Amino acid sequence: MLELLLMWGAVFVIAAAAELASMQLVSIWFAVGAIGAFIAAFFGVGFTGQLAIFVAVSVVLVIATRPLLKKLRVKQTPALNADREIGDTAVVIEEVNPALGTGRARHNGIDWIAVSENGTVIPKEAVVMITAVEGAKLVVRGIG
């Protein structure tokens, strides 16, 4: 009996840890099912009964909470379209120097990390054209 109690305790801990790590409500039902099976094991129910309780509790919780989760789920905001920055101009506020790993530019009032498109040094105060956006970096080239 002790082995089964330890097994269901381990299932609970693993499911709860997975839930805490993901925060996506994907394993919480199994943690609750493991509690049900643990209680059954404590009262001497055989392994087949424990397994049936684990599965039944988990399935009932999934079915019962799924419609509620659909209603409560926050709609994802669409990703920003960074491509709209391409072709715009920006002003270098810190020299863009690939050898030193420096470079910042200001575009529409926002400071960005800036990297040179072709590896050239671009001085501070230079006006540059944005040729690409890579994450939080503007890829730029000097104008003129």
Image (cartoon, rainbow, N blue to C red):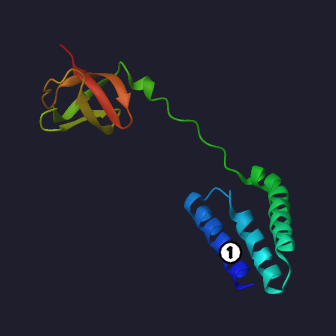
Tell me residue 117's x, y (percent): 25, 22
Q: Residue at x 60, y 62 (%)?
A: 18
* In the displayed structure image, the side of residue 144 where residue 138 appears, left or right: right
Relative vertical location of residue 22 with respect to residue 33 in this rendering, above or below: above
Relative vertical location of residue 48 with respect to residue 40 in this rendering, above or below: above
Quadrant containing the C terminus is top left
Tell me residue 80's x, y (percent): 50, 34
Residue type pointed to by label 1:
Met
Relative vertical location of residue 22 with respect to residue 51 in this rendering, above or below: above
Question: Considering depth in this image, is 53 or 22 the residue closer to the camera?
Answer: 53
Q: Residue at x 73, y 54 (%)?
A: 72
Question: Considering depth in this image, is 107 or 95 the residue closer to the camera?
Answer: 95
Instruction: Using the rendered view, name the quadrant where residue 1 is placed.
Output: bottom right
Q: Residue at x 44, y 24 (%)?
A: 83
Q: Which residue is mark 1?
A: 7
Q: Residues within 10 Å of mark 1 (few under 14, many from 20)?
A: some
Tell me residue 14's x, y (percent): 61, 67
Question: Considering depth in this image, is 32 or 70 the residue closer to the camera?
Answer: 32
Instruction: Using the rendered view, name the quadrant where residue 102 is placed.
Output: top left
Judging from the image, what secondary structure is the residue with disc 1 in? helix
